[in-house]
Amino acid sequence: MESRPRMTKQRQVILEELRMMRSHPTADELYERVRGRLPRISLGTVYRNLEKLAGSGMIRKLDYPGSQMRFDGDLHGHQHIRCISCGRIEDIDGAPEPTRCDRELLAGSGYRLVERRVEYVGICPECDAMEKGNQKS
Amino acid sequence: MESRPRMTKQRQVILEELRMMRSHPTADELYERVRGRLPRISLGTVYRNLEKLAGSGMIRKLDYPGSQMRFDGDLHGHQHIRCISCGRIEDIDGAPEPTRCDRELLAGSGYRLVERRVEYVGICPECDAMEKGNQKS
DNA sequence: TTAATAATAGTAACGATTACCAATATTAAT
DNA sequence: ATTAATATTGGTAATCGTTACTATTATTAA
């Protein structure tokens, strides 16, 4: 009845590669990477394993607005900033977010607060340079 | 060469209905609503107009993680809280978000900060009650 | 009116993700 | 090692939200 997870070669390689990357790849980016070592792996397998690994807390799933899901093999506490232009997500080492008057703000809503996400959105140096280069006037 | 927008019946009804709703509907929820008044309207038209209206600043597009895009006809400054269980988004009247040590946090990143989003995630009273009702042990 | 052209309805296409299923590989027990 | 139980796989089809396409229609300014 109980299902114990099995450490397949695929799962291991996916985990290893994700931890190796300092970026926060999408499933298909990681898929391309992993194919270097396991050419016959399926994209579905990558998705399935990322889901499992995130469920068991071995990796983080970054569910940011926009489009694709991204994944993070680094579990140490840190923040992220997302480039509004190219979509990349980078780490920001820093203190945990301060909680403030959030409680009072939410007092009247009847909601039970689960999480308070602070999302930094900006333009990465590369895109910034590119934008400036393309300026007409 | 220049394209001036035209206030079609469809656009008007979409705008009116969105403003009437205190919820933050998805495109297809609004589509169902609008069909009560314009039975032959197309879903594509709803998407197109929502995009246009958001682009011109007449409505807000709520691009939260998870799944569908949601829209808000209320432009007065307010925050949102999203139910992690049913996905609904509700208003929180309150002060604008405080900026804090964000600048210093971002100092080393090289990013140009565009926006700092605070997202409140919780469980709405209805889902909370339902969860408690379903508790086994 | 008329001419110029946004905008429409309807439908096909798209991209990210999930579901399906027969075949395979891992694990625990013999 | 051998086995039995079953989690996992590869491959592909299906799903879902959204966008693109296109011929037709409706709005606007002249």
Image (cartoon, coloured by chain):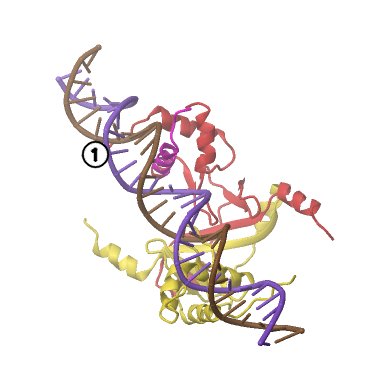
Chain colours: A red, B yellow, C purple, D brown
**Hey, what amino acid is under mark 1?**
Glu
Q: Nearer the viewer, residue B82 or A41?
A: A41
Asked if the stretch drawn in magenta spans residue A43, the answer is yes
Q: Position of residue B13 (x, y in %)?
A: 51, 81
Relative to residue B49, is residue A1 depicted above or below? above
Q: Name the residue carrying label 1.
A: A2
Residue B40 location (% of width, % of height): 44, 75
Q: Position of residue A49 (x, y in %)?
A: 41, 38
Task: Give neighbour class at mark 1: few <14, some 14-19, many 20+ (Cα, 10 Å).
Answer: few
Q: Is residue A111 visible?
A: yes
Q: What segment is highlighted magenta in the picture? A: A39-54
**Position of the C terminus of chain B by quadrant:** bottom left
Viewport quadrant of the N terminus of chain B = bottom right
| Residue at (51, 44) in percent of width and height | A71
Residue C23 sits above or below residue A68 on the image: above
Dividing the picture into quadrants, the one containing residue B28 is bottom left
Closer to the camera in the image, A91 or B51: B51
The answer to whether residue B49 is above or below residue B102 is below
**Front residue of A22 and A51:** A51
Q: Is residue B5 left or right of residue A107?
A: right
